[in-house]
Amino acid sequence: MPTWSGSRPAPRWRWRAGRRDGPPVRVLVTGADGFVGRYLVRHLLQAGDQVAAGCRPGGPAVSWGRDGPADAWVEPLPLEITDDGSIAAALAWKPEAIVHLAAIASVREARENPGTAWEVNAAGTARLAAGAAALREAGRVDPVFLLVSTGEVYGPGGAAPRAETDPLRPVSPYAASKVGAEAAALETWRRTGLRVIVARPFPHTGAGQSPQYVVPAFAARLRAARASGARTVPTGNLAPVRDLLDVRDVAAAYRVLLGRGTAGEVYNVSRGEGVPLTELFARLAALIGTTAAPAPDPALVRSVDIPHLVGDSTKLRRATGWAPALSFEQTLQGLVDAEAD
């Protein structure tokens, strides 16, 4: 299945960048209490935007900081993505832009409950896009809607970097539900004119990421091995090759896409360089200061893994001028330093 397309023209939306061109832009970030959401909220504040932070009710309190201009601010909003009333209440804030991050983002969690993954990721996106389109149709505000999908939608393939025109062959309930989310959002664009842009980020990491993801998991186990003097560290399959970005570069890509992306289009967010997990493990071990060796543990191996997942971000770079500002080495060093504090 190729990247989605339609007959409706794909207009560009001109972003009013912070205080330089006009008043701050009002941005609703769903999943603002998640790993990427926290970084994105801070990035938007630093750029001078006004931010509504959509967070699931009942979650832990979040402090995003106020690192931007004195008049930058964030308004927490309760948001349950599976509830139409909650979505309508959050959209009453009348955002000029929406970055939709809220999702079941764990491959393991989605595999354990595929129905919930589809309800949150696909149906939740359909609900939010419908609400945003209703705002537009009522003439209240005309938001741009950035859906954050995943590079995992491409599934297994060859060793070449994936382009946006490559077929989608998901091999997990998580990735399949994200294909469903893309379909729902882009159908809304074709039918209503809601300015939908799809971002497909490849793996990314940074300080504060959950240890259920590979980089912080390796770091935690290697740190424990150094402390205990263990000679081995349990790992899953280390043969796969992955494209790895810094979460701060990903946040920057999302904001620039709001202003320079084209409605109806899909953009890979990636470094474009593959790193074998064996090399990732070795680099982290050296930074942490341990000679512990990897020891494969069947309990940590995915039933189906993508051997090579690297993204071609040429389209994003040409459209927006974005490029990663942080090297792979800086990302790993920053994560190790932060966890050591």
Image: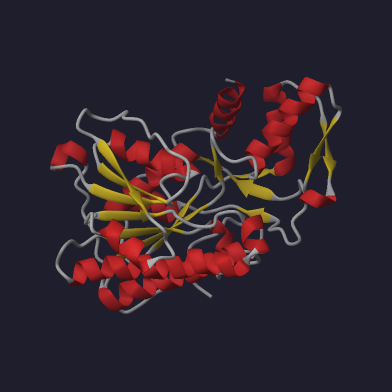
Closer to us: 326 or 178:
178
Write down the quadrant of residue 38 in the picture.
top left
Pick the front one: 44 or 73 = 73
Would residue 194 be seen by someone viewing this image from the given angle?
no
Number of residue marks: 0
Percent position of residue 29, x then y: 35, 50
Rendering colour mode: secondary structure
Task: Give coordinates of residue 182: x percent, y percent.
Answer: 45, 68
Asked if residue 341 is positioned above or below residue 238 in the image, the reply reads above
Asked if residue 269 is positioned above or below residue 234 in the image, the reply reads: below
Is residue 146 visible to us here?
Answer: yes
Q: Position of residue 42 (x, y in %)?
A: 36, 36
Q: Quadrant of the C terminus?
A: top right
Describe residue 304's horizontal placement relative to residue 262 as left or right: right
Q: Is residue 194 left or right of residue 175?
A: left
Decide if residue 230 is on the left or right side of residue 187. right
Q: Nearer the viewer, residue 109 or 293?
A: 109
Q: Is residue 69 above or below residue 151?
A: above
* Residue 36 x %, y %: 46, 44
Q: Which residue corresponds to the image point at 35% horizontal and 77% vertical from the top-left?
A: 6
The residue located at (27%, 54%) in the rendering is 97
Instruction: Name the one closer to the observer, 53 or 326.
Output: 53
